[in-house]
Amino acid sequence: MRIGILSRAPRCYSTSRLRRAATSRGHRARVLDVLQFAICLDQGGAHLYYRNKPAPRLDAIIPRVGTGMTSFGTAVMRHYESLGVRCVNSAKAFANARDKLRALQILAGHGLAVPHTECVRSVTQVESAVARVGGPPVVVKLIEGAQGVGVMLAQTVEEAATLVAAFRTARQDVLIQEFVHDSRGRDIRALVVGDKVMAAMRRLARGSEFRCNVHRGAYTEPVVLDRLYEKAALEATQALELRVAGADLLETPRGPLVTEVNASPGLEGIEKTVGADVAGAIVDELLREGGRATPPSAEGSRRPVRGREPLGPITPSA
């Protein structure tokens, strides 16, 4: 099977582990830089190029698309999907998970417990929003972000208003979220592959840092989830129609709260903490899904990769 790994960092841990896991199983795996694709649209349909040549023909895709490239990355994914190429997470599901507001809307709509969250567009809305989520301190975060970037703690209404004003000046949409004191500086990352939790770890921030991202220096410990937390992780992943995800859960007296579901979770922390072959499980999930992709044209064809359906606008699906 020809597997394309959409990533701009071929040497990073997650990308290289996925590539090795694929090749060790007898597949041909290639890391493809999302920014080297070009999409051509004309009356004949959509055509895809890579490094100014017809894009490689693939049987499956594993997206490792960065937050700044979600829109174009999902457009490339949709094009391949229109050819019958399997994607470990669909473009629609990937885009929904990447948009924190949309993801929370879907999770709440499925009855999952999430932190009380408000989306504000103006500084004049901040005071009321802070009051509705339980008062300060509150978490202020960008709708699209990763690894703790764009996530800040506001101790007062005034601080929250200042942060919102700064983000809005940069034309960024902002969420105001309740600060769960019981979970300060700690959460659980559950790595879901298919219909099971492959591994889980607790992340704990160091010092006064409230964000517990590994990239922010948090340390980790393996954890065995009880039935309630495992159920929350699986239901959150399924609600977003993801097949591979990192579900982030807060431990609270009222049970697990789902804060985020990452459609492109990092593998280094979880694999080294738990010792599980998550990369291999992800590759196996592509095969387990059943049925082969629509047979592509001959390998030697020099025609650009063309979709059978209109590509649609290059924006994330709602």
Image (cartoon, rainbow, N blue to C red):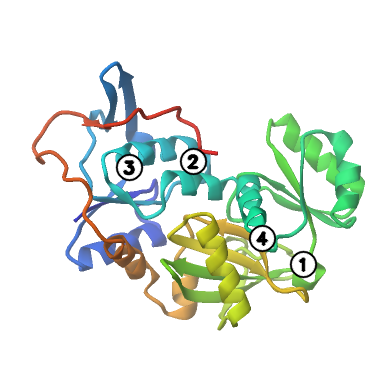
Mark 4 and mark 2 residues within 8 Å of each other at the beta carbon: no
What secondary structure is marked by label 3?
helix
- Name the residue located 32 percent from the left edge and 69 percent from the top edge: 280
Give residue 237's position: percent from left, percent from top: 52, 61
Give me the C-alpha separation between circle 1 and circle 4.
33 Å
Residue type pointed to by label 2: Thr
Give residue 35's position: percent from left, percent from top: 38, 36
Mark 3 and mark 4 residues within 8 Å of each other at the beta carbon: no
| Of 250 and 14, the residue lying toward us | 250
Judged by depth in the image, the label closer to the viewer, 3 or 4, is: 4
| Of 93 and 290, the residue lying toward us | 290
Give me the C-alpha separation between circle 2 and circle 1.
32 Å
Give residue 200's position: percent from left, percent from top: 53, 75
Structural crowding at the residue carrying mark 2, measured as other residues with C-alpha within 10 Å and reported as few (<14), some (14–19) or many (≥20): many
Vertical comparison of 126 with 114: above or below? above
Q: Earlier in the sequence, mark 4 or mark 2?
A: 2
Residue where numbered disc 3 is placed: 81
Vertical comparison of 280 with 90: above or below? below
For the question of whether residue 214 can be seen, the reply is no
Mark sitting on residue 111: 4
Structural crowding at the residue carrying mark 3, measured as other residues with C-alpha within 10 Å and reported as few (<14), some (14–19) or many (≥20): many
Mark 1 and mark 4 residues within 8 Å of each other at the beta carbon: no
197 left or right of 120 in image: left
- Name the residue located 19 percent from the left edge and 60 percent from the top edge: 27
- Name the residue located 88 percent from the left edge and 34 percent from the top edge: 124
Residue type pointed to by label 4: Gly
Judged by depth in the image, the label closer to the viewer, 3 or 1, is: 3
